[in-house]
């Protein structure tokens, strides 16, 4: 029984490690490629939080028949599927530059005491001057423009656009995905294309080597746990005739 528990523990550890490696390489992003993509608070896309800024990327989490679950600059929500959003795609350049992208939305400050309205209840909270906030998008309500923002780690709400001085959505810069660093030597487009392909295969090789490196110790442990014991050496018990190892011809000379 003890061996069985050890075996299960080894297999679960190996599986979770391999799954974690695979998941880490599967981060996907959705490009906000128009000015009408909304972020919703519910999976059925009935309650609008804001219209997201175009040119930015949302991190994909999961999907259902209607929407994609995403995280946008720290805000959880849902984006309606096509035609509002394209399918999630892996993008290593966006992944490596994601924090820089978010920082472009987080460079604004209140210039005076400003009221923050709760997302659900419209309750008011006074935000002091010189408070940093992350711009997440805008929406219209009762004819007024509201900015959906995040303050600190986990405070979300709306600023009235008219309450903010020296800030509007037009002050948010467009996000441009970084370009790969140029090679030390000039390359033709054909050579660059030919060299771009091995990177994908290199990732596959690294993944395979990681999986092999994890599985070999697991298999070794399983083998040692269930390795059959050696058969005991045959010994003379006295019940069998004792073998005469002498040469039978010795009696001839006696």
Image (cartoon, rainbow, N blue to C red):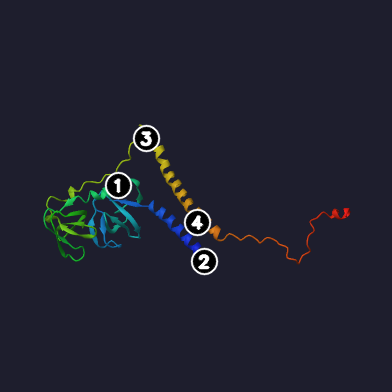
Residue 37 appears at what percent x and percent y? 26, 54
Q: CA distance from mark 4 to mark 1?
A: 36 Å
Compare marks 2 and 4 and give the one earlier in the sequence: 2
Q: CA distance from mark 2 to mark 3?
A: 61 Å
Q: Secondary structure at mark 3?
A: helix
Residue 252 appears at what percent x and percent y? 88, 54
The residue depicted at 41 percent of the width and 42 percent of the height is: 199
Compare marks 3 and 4 and give the one earlier in the sequence: 3
Q: CA distance from mark 2 to mark 1?
A: 48 Å
Res 128 seen here = yes
Label annotation for residue 97: 1
Q: Are marks 3 and 4 in contact (CB under 8 Å)?
A: no
Which residue in the structure is indicated by mark 3? Answer: 189
Which residue in the structure is indicated by mark 2? Answer: 2
Q: Secondary structure at mark 1?
A: helix
Can you name the residue that lies furthest to the front here? Answer: 254
Q: Quadrant of residue 157?
A: bottom left
Along the viewing direction, whichever of 11 and 195 lies nearer the viewer: 11
Compare marks 2 and 3 and give the one earlier in the sequence: 2
In the image, which is nearer the foreground, mark 2 or mark 3?
2
The residue depicted at 51 percent of the width and 53 percent of the height is: 216
Res 33 seen here = no
Along the viewing direction, whichever of 163 and 134 lies nearer the viewer: 134
Q: Is residue 209 left or right of residue 113?
A: right
Q: Is residue 190 left or right of residue 32?
A: right
Label annotation for residue 236: none
């Amino acid at each position: 029984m003890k061996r069985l528990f050890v075996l299960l523990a080894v297999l679960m550890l190996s599986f979770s490690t391999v799954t974690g490696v695979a998941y880490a390489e599967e981060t996907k992003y959705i490009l906000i490629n128009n000015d009408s993509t909304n972020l919703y608070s519910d999976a059925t896309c009935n309650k609008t939080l804001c219209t997201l800024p175009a040119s930015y990327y949302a991190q994909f989490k999961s999907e259902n028949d209607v929407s994609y679950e995403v995280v946008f600059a720290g805000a959880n929500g849902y984006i309606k599927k096509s035609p509002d959003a394209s399918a999630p795609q892996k993008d290593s350049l966006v992944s490596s530059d994601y924090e820089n992208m978010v920082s472009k939305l987080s460079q604004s400050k209140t210039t005076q005491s400003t009221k923050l309205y709760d997302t659900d209840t419209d309750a008011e909270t006074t935000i002091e001057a010189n408070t940093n906030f992350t711009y997440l998008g805008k929406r219209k309500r009762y004819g007024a423009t509201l900015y959906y923002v995040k303050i600190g780690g986990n405070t979300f709400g709306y600023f009235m656009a008219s309450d903010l001085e020296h800030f509007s959505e037009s002050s948010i810069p467009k996000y441009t995905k970084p370009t790969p660093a140029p090679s030390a030597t000039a390359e033709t487009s054909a050579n660059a294309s030919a060299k771009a392909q091995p990177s994908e295969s290199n990732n596959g090789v690294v993944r395979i080597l990681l999986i092999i490196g994890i599985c070999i110790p697991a298999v070794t442990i399983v083998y040692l746990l269930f390795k059959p014991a050696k058969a005991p050496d045959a010994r003379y018990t006295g019940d069998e005739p004792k073998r005469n190892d002498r040469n039978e011809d010795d009696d001839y000379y006696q």
